[in-house]
Amino acid sequence: MVSGKDSGPHTRLRYGMVGGGRDAFIGAVHRMAAALDGQAELVAGALSSTPEKSIASGRDLGLADDRNYGSWQDMLAGELARKPGDRIDFVSIVTPNHVHFPVAQAFAKAGIHVVLDKPMVLSSDQANALVQAVEESGVVFAVTYNYTGYPMVKQAAQLVRSGAIGNVRKVFVEYHQGWLSDKLEDTGQKQAAWRTDPKRSGIAGCVGDIGTHAENLVHTITGLEISELCADVTTFVQGRALDDDAAVLLRFSNGARGTLTCSQVCYGEENGLSIRVYGTKGALAWKQEEPNFLIYTPTDGAKRILKPGGPESAASAHATRLPPGHPEAFIEAFANIYRGAIEAIRALQAGEAPHGLAAEFPTVYDGARGVRFIERVIESGRAGGSWIQF
């Protein structure tokens, strides 16, 4: 049921985008990420929630009139009406959260590969239905937990898997911002308005927006599975409908313990995502705002600063584009998710097993786990911080 074969290894894949039109933030980031390696071309779009704005946004980007659609339903029907070799290979979905499920499910069922912004959907019921659709159709399905694309995150994961720090005992992860310290949603600011609206964002605010990134980072680096959690979930800004701060205690299935905090009311913080992992033989520390440095401390206590392209950072090489000493950051990390999905699509088309980036990007299963994390945190918070089975 998946889309037709590419005409060759050097032919760019064609993709369409749902959302990401005028006044959108993340759509432009996705387009830059998809374009960075020259392996994908935006050829179709349904870029906004109204036909008029959608068409205008498509014209801004130079889409051909016959592939500049007024709605995602029109885009799906229009692309399926084309010959397999001419229709889009994958769709990039960059809408507010409440639109994710129907669009992703419809394209996956139609056999069109999917790249979807996080959090994947609004509920575990939707997540399970999406997992079923992906398994039945066999499509490649990527969820853009983009921070996992950083080279030194990949190096950290390799160090943990290799046993370099022994058995993981303790994890601290945090993601702190300050942009919602005041009631920005009342000013008409688009990003604040939908992210704090339960109808569009879902049951969680801060937890769903950035807390889920923190959970995914822990899983990506350590491979640990949460067994139980206990959460203190708070709304500090008066009149806000969703949470803007949370602190979560984690128990992992191997006996390790963790602490996860996320907040959007920390004045002065921008995108303060960081993680520390402590094992029986050493420790790792990484900060998103200083992404090219991974601090590795073995049992002798001598800290080592690992960098992309360095002799001790071989696992980061396939996610690095520039010579050592040239900083790579957010767009490049985002692009690694797209490159992985594109390479996985090519591998599927060629009947080959995926490897490298094609075997590393977050999938529908990561997305489903992220949705479950959000639900369990909110459930625990509403129960006064009770321990909840994951």
Image: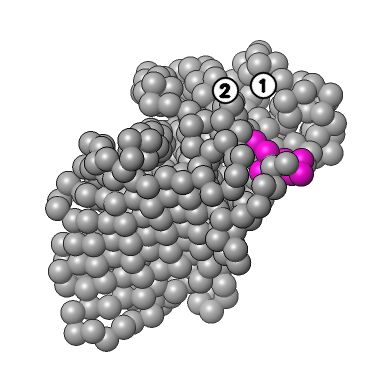
- At a point 38% along the width and 35% down the height, the residue shown is 382
- Lateral position of residue 212 relative to residue 99, left or right: left
The reply to whether residue 47 is in sight is yes
| Classed neighbour count for the residue bearing mark 2: other residues with Cα under 10 Å, few (<14), some (14–19), many (≥20) | some
**Residue 192 belongs to magenta span:** yes
Q: Which mark is residue 103?
A: 2
The vertical placement of 158 against 110, above or below, is: below
Name the spot of residue 76 as percent of width and height, x first: 63, 18
The reply to whether residue 163 is in sight is no
Q: Nearer the viewer, residue 109 or 240?
A: 240
Quadrant hosting residue 310: bottom left
The amino acid type, in three-letter code, at marker 2 is Val
Name the spot of residue 262 as percent of width and height, x first: 45, 53
Element class at badge 2: helix
**Which residue is identified by label 1?**
72
- At a point 61% along the width and 39% down the height, the residue shown is 239
| Classed neighbour count for the residue bearing mark 1: other residues with Cα under 10 Å, few (<14), some (14–19), many (≥20) | many
Specify the principal SS of the magenta part.
helix
Q: Is the residue under label 1 in contact with that under label 2 (CB below 8 Å)? A: yes
- Lateral position of residue 163 relative to residue 295, left or right: left
Q: In this figure, which colouring scheme has been used for the structure?
A: one colour
Which region shows up in magenta?
187-195
The amino acid type, in three-letter code, at marker 1 is Trp
Quadrant hosting residue 16: top right
**Residue 108 belongs to magenta span:** no
- At a point 53% along the width and 79% down the height, the residue shown is 325
Quadrant hosting residue 78: top right
